[in-house]
Amino acid sequence: QEMRKQLGIPAGRRVAAFVGGEWERKGLKIALQALAKATAWYLVVAGKGDEGRYRELADSLGVGGAVHWLGIVREIEVVFALADAFILPSSYETFSLVTFEAAASGLPIVATPVSGVRELLEDGKNGFLIARDPDLLAQRLTQLADDPELCARIGKAARESSLRFGWDVMVREHDRLYS
């Protein structure tokens, strides 16, 4: 709540987190276009990219005031703590570790079925799988904003799913594999 106050995010507004570099590939443009349609939401962007270009895009879409540019954040859990959802409309990931971190933080995930996300998400159960389409992303964000119980249930399921990929489980599985 403290960070929301610092950023000037009004009470009752939802916050979506977008995390990472390579903004073109990760779909920041799609996220900004979706934000223009999902008006209950603010967007926090953590990571490094061509901020000038994307600020201009946000302004041209009329959402400049609803986007907060955090730059590189060392303690990403702070970003997840202030967010209500995590979005990743990415075209490609080698393995999206940040999605697992967001899920472990109890955030509902709205993402494309890229590597890592595919293994974690079951559409409608612990997140939403979408195509790289701002309309679909906006639809899912609106659905989450309109239904706080759904948002809480999906976030809880995301957290439970992420525990299957904890260090202790991974070490045990690798041990079994090598045996």
Image (cartoon, grey):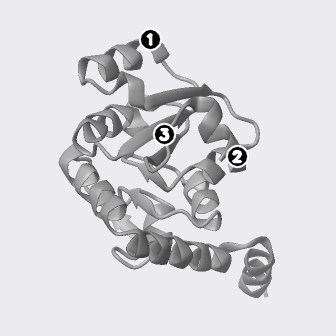
Residue 112 at x, y = what percent?
35, 56
* Chain-order first, disc 3 or disc 1: 3
For the residue labelled by badge 2, is the local secondary structure a helix, a strand or a loop?
helix
- Between label 3 and label 1, give the one nearer the viewer: 3
Q: What residue is shown with label 1?
A: 52
Q: What residue is shown with label 2?
A: 78
Residue at (25, 17) in percent of width and height:
60
Residue at (66, 29) in percent of width and height:
72
Residue 67 at x, y = what percent?
44, 30
Q: What residue is shown with label 3?
A: 10
Other residues around mark 2 within 10 Å, as few (<14) / some (14–19) / many (≥20): few
Q: Is any atom of residue 47 visible in this view?
A: no
Amino acid at dot 3: Pro
Q: Distance between the residues labelled 2 and 1?
A: 24 Å
Residue at (46, 59) in percent of width and height:
115
Q: How far apart are marks 2 and 3 (CA)?
A: 18 Å
Amino acid at dot 1: Gly
Say above or below: 46 vs 60: below
Say above or below: 19 vs 118: above
- Between label 2 and label 3, give the one nearer the viewer: 3
Other residues around mark 3 within 10 Å, as few (<14) / some (14–19) / many (≥20): few
Q: Is any atom of residue 43 visible in this view?
A: yes
Q: Quadrant of residue 161?
A: bottom right
Residue 13 at x, y = what percent?
43, 47
